[in-house]
Image (spheres, rainbow, N blue to C red):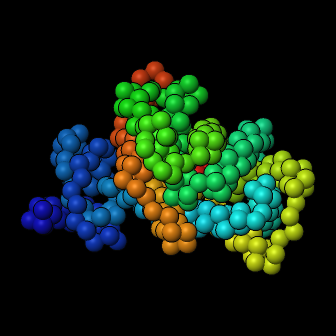
């Protein structure tokens, strides 16, 4: 490659200098618009012929792909930060739910997130109401319902199991994306659905299938699965909104709808928090806001498969926190269930969704992305 690059430089010094970028890594790319590049360097022959240009990373010939990779790296960092923030949020919710009702925790978190969102919108000089208020409100309603289910599961189930069951939502997202986003539901998606559902069974360990001395409560597992389904529906709306709405506006609507909807229920069973619980509320709101903003921005930048893989760090974080603070340990069946859920969802990112009419791969969307997520329910 170095010899070829030197030969190219000797033939056209101007062309070589034009390919020098900031990355410092030598790469070879085949020019798809040779006529344009050759026209930019007078004296070359065969302007219509496809050539191989040797350039340094970040050069003009592959500048577009370098920018895309930079955006993907940024999205990967944001997704990892989101996973850690949401795992911390789950731990704080479980600590607060030892004495406080879940509706009160949901309300407190939403109030803190609402004020943080307003402050960030004001700093960014953005109008909070958005361009599609009806769809934004629907996203908020779905996210609020998913949030309540998820918080109930965090209270009633072990931290790692509740988080693992919640990660079935990308599989539901693929099922919903077929009719709502026009994406193709391939056999691989059907296999992923079966693997995810089987994984939930292994995590729950029902007594009629397993001789487990301590199976999970079926009602709590059902509510956790319902939360994953509602979360998937909210993901579809997030992907529809990304073309017109700023991520801060989407986060603001979730907080606003949650405050309005949860206030009557929380007032009926209000328990006065202690100073320690007020600190937990602040921590829940702060980690939620950080995770929500990081996640929503990452979904604008990151391709589907990578978003799914990185997002599963949350299960690792949650299981670690559960083992440290509550002494929770996974048995072999539970570990197998988590592997099936993770593997089933990762398979969704291996096959790109097709656009209606068979026009080839579509841009990343909630259905085929297997997105993790979490933008809906957090």
Q: Is residue 136 left or right of residue 59?
A: right
Q: State the residue at coordinates (64%, 54%).
A: 156
Q: In the figure, 361 relative to 28: above or below?
A: above
Q: In the figure, 348 relative to 294: above or below?
A: above
Q: Is residue 307 left or right of residue 61?
A: right
Q: State the residue at coordinates (72%, 72%).
A: 280
Q: Is residue 354 left or right of residue 44?
A: right
Quadrant into which the C terminus falls: bottom right
- The spot of residue 32 in percent (x, y) is 29, 43
Tell me which corner region of the image, top left, top right, bottom left or bottom right, holds residue 196: top left
Along the line of sight, which residue is nearer the eye, 91 or 326? 326
Q: Residue furthest top?
A: 357
Quadrant into which the N terminus falls: bottom left
- The spot of residue 347 in percent (x, y) is 37, 41
Q: Is residue 337 left or right of residue 233?
A: left
Q: Is residue 161 visible?
A: yes
Q: Residue furthest left?
A: 3
- The spot of residue 329 in percent (x, y) is 45, 62
Q: State the residue at coordinates (44%, 27%).
A: 185
- The spot of residue 301 in percent (x, y) is 50, 54
């Amino acid at each position: 490659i170095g010899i070829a690059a030197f030969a190219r430089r000797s033939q056209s010094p101007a062309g070589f200098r034009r390919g020098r970028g900031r990355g410092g890594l030598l790469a070879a790319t085949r020019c798809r618009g040779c006529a344009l590049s050759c026209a930019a360097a007078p004296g070359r022959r065969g302007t219509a012929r496809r050539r191989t240009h040797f350039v340094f990373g970040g050069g003009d010939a592959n500048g577009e792909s370098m920018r895309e990779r930079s955006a993907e790296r940024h999205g990967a960092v944001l997704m990892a930060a989101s996973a850690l923030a949401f795992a911390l949020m789950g731990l704080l919710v479980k600590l607060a739910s030892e004495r406080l009702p879940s509706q009160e925790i949901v309300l407190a978190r939403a109030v803190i997130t609402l004020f943080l969102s307003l402050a960030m919108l004001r700093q960014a000089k953005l109008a909070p109401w958005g361009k599609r208020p009806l769809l934004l409100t629907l996203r908020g309603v779905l996210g609020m319902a998913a949030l309540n289910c998820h918080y109930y599961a965090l209270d009633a189930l072990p931290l790692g199991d509740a988080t693992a069951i919640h990660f079935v939502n990308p599989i539901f997202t693929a099922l919903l994306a077929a009719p709502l986003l026009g994406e193709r539901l391939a056999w691989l998606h059907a296999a992923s659905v079966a693997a995810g559902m089987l994984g939930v069974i292994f995590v729950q360990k029902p007594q009629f299938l397993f001789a487990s001395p301590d199976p999970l409560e079926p009602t709590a597992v059902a509510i956790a699965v319902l939360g994953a389904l509602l979360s998937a529906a909210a993901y579809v709306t997030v992907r529809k909104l990304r073309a017109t709405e700023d991520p801060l506006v989407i986060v603001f609507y979730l907080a606003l709808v949650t405050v309005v909807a949860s206030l009557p229920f929380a007032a009926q069973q209000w328990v006065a928090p202690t100073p320690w619980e007020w600190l937990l509320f602040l921590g829940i709101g702060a980690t939620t806001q950080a995770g929500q903003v990081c996640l929503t921005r990452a979904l604008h930048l990151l391709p589907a498969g990578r978003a799914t893989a990185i997002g599963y760090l949350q299960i690792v974080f949650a299981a670690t926190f559960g083992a440290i603070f509550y002494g929770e340990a996974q048995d072999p069946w539970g570990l197998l269930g988590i592997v099936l859920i993770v593997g089933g969802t990762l398979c969704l990112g291996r096959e790109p969704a097709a656009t209606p009419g068979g026009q080839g791969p579509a841009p990343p969307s909630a259905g085929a992305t297997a997105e993790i997520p979490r933008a809906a329910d957090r």
